[in-house]
């Protein structure tokens, strides 16, 4: 049993959270500490609550349903009743529903063993850390959280509360994961010195209304179907405007982590893990087009410098985003198979179909041994471009995945597997991406100390590591 927080302490904490949130009630149910992973009986399902049930959340919910291992016990969305929530509401008409996850935990927390957090980037943290502190397993969409501080706190909470965690980079349970792991262990992928990763499809902030933006959107009347205070969560106070909703939040530094935070976790996640890149020491915005204090650049090129790790050489990972900002490609660049299950980027297009040459989203990995590996995104596998050299290599057998990302999470909650993208793995990846977002925002080279987790050459950027101070009533989440 996970007895990190006693029943009385949990009850008191929930009461404090609700009081700070100006709720007219107190916690009426005593939170129950569920059995630790591995203590459930065979054939049992995981009692799961869904926080964020539209768009990506709806997709995740469908995938969880396919596993046959999920028992849905609560639905939560700040926009319950909006058109994008209707599909899930109709699918689960008798499941309790809420607009505020704090109220959900107060009312039905006893029934919850795990949660999905599929809200906007900036609001992942409070829902995830509250759930973890209450002994719930968490599946959190990528990126893990919005700021380096939030991500670091979630990494620590994973160890503290000993719950199962998984970040929603689904390809981390697919073919590319097992190939990269097997090829690295067999010494096929080694002596890597350079990686180019790119996401060059159209993004929401490429729309004309965002070009040259000089302020936040003007205030609109707040509709009855949204709990705007709960939607804002720990973010700075903003006046309501529906231009921040339905995925448009990703355009804004205050709410999203841009193309890098969205797609980096699908493109260079396996390289980051199996090359043991850790955290960079330098992030250099080589190219920023359309720098803006409110929204992400129209195009950016960021060079991340990673130091040597044991016998592994230093690596420069260069990220390219923007519609006309592809990296220089090898002359022998070939065709890359593209997973038909990969959804198009929200608000844009640009992923080419099967057999596309130089897809707009992908990676090229260079070894000092003269091998170049080319791949796409999510679960798509790598190809060695030097075909003659490849023929002389003894490629290892790559095992098939025993479970997709969703089933892997639920099986881990049941004690039958370990998650492949726990916060201990996905957290440092997301911290790296969050550092890139800071470089985009200040448009300056950053020197970073991975030990102290400080930016040593830019005070404003160093302050951005913590994100914005939470609004009154939300600061408790940083004290768990």
Image (cartoon, grey):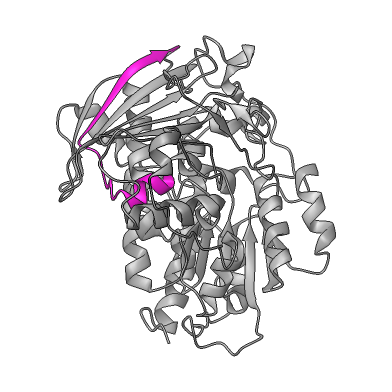
Q: Is residue 343 visible?
A: yes
The residue drawn where x is 50% and y is 35% is 256
Q: Which residues are magenta?
A: 269-290
The residue drawn where x is 56% and y is 52% is 170
| As drawn, 371 above or below 172 | above
| As drawn, 249 above or below 171 | above
Residue 278 in the figure: left or right of residue 219 = left
Residue 86 in the figure: left or right of residue 169 = right
- Residues 255 and 451: in front is 451
The image position of residue 150, as x and y in percent, is: 37, 50
The image position of residue 388, as x and y in percent, is: 42, 35
The image position of residue 156, as x and y in percent, is: 31, 62
Q: Tell me where residue 206 sits by quadrant.
A: top right
| Residue 314 is a magenta residue | no
Q: Is residue 373 visible?
A: no
Residue 90 in the figure: left or right of residue 383 = right
The residue drawn where x is 67% and y is 63% is 64
The image position of residue 30, as x and y in percent, is: 53, 82
| As drawn, 101 above or below 36 | above
| Residue 277 is a magenta residue | yes
Name the quadrant of the C terminus: bottom left
């Amino acid at each position: 049993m996970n007895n990190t927080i006693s029943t009385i302490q949990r009850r008191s904490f929930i009461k404090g959270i609700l009081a700070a949130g100006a709720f007219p009630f107190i916690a009426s149910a005593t939170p129950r500490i569920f059995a630790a992973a591995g203590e459930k009986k065979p054939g049992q399902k995981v009692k799961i609550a869904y926080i964020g049930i539209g768009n990506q959340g709806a997709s995740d919910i469908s995938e969880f349903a396919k596993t046959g291992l999920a028992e849905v016990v609560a639905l939560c969305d700040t926009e319950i009743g909006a058109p994008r929530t209707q599909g899930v509401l109709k699918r689960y008409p008798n499941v309790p529903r809420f607009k505020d996850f704090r109220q959900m935990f107060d009312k039905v927390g006893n029934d919850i063993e795990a949660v999905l957090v599929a809200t906007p980037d900036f609001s992942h943290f409070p829902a995830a850390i509250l759930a973890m502190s209450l002994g719930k397993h968490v599946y959190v969409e990528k990126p893990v959280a919005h700021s380096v501080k939030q991500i670091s706190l979630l990494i620590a909470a994973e160890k503290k509360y000993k719950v199962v965690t998984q970040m929603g980079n689904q390809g981390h349970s697919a073919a590319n994961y097992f190939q990269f792991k097997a090829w690295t262990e067999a010494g096929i992928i080694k002596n890597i010195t350079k990686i180019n990763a790119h996401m060059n499809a159209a993004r929401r902030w490429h729309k004309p209304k965002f070009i040259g933006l000089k302020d936040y959107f003007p205030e609109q009347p707040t509709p009855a179907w949204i709990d705007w205070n709960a939607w804002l969560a720990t973010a700075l106070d903003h006046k309501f405007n529906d231009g921040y909703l339905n995925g448009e939040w990703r355009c804004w530094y205050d709410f999203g982590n841009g193309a890098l935070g969205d797609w980096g976790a699908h493109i260079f996640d396996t390289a980051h893990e199996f090359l043991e890149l850790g955290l960079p020491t330098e992030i250099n915005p080589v190219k920023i087009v359309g720098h803006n204090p409110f929204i992400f650049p129209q195009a950016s090129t960021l060079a991340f410098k990673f130091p040597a790790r044991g016998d592994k050489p230093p690596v420069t990972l260069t990220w390219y985003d923007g519609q006309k900002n592809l990296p220089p490609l090898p002359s022998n660049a070939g065709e890359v198979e593209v997973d038909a299950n990969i959804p198009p980027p929200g608000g844009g297009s640009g992923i080419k179909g099967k057999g596309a040459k130089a897809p707009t989203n992908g990676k090229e990995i260079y070894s000092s041994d003269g091998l170049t590996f080319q791949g796409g995104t999510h679960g798509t596998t790598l190809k060695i471009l030097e075909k003659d050299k490849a023929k002389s290599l003894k490629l290892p057998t790559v095992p098939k995945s025993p479970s997709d990302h969703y089933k892997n999470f639920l099986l881990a909650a049941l004690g039958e597997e370990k998650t492949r993208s726990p916060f201990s793995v996905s957290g440092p990846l997301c911290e790296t991406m969050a550092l890139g977002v800071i470089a985009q925002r200040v448009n300056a080279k950053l020197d970073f100390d991975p030990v102290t987790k400080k930016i040593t050459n830019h005070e404003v950027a160093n302050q951005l590591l913590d994100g914005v101070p939470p609004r009154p009533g939300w600061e408790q989440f940083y004290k768990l």
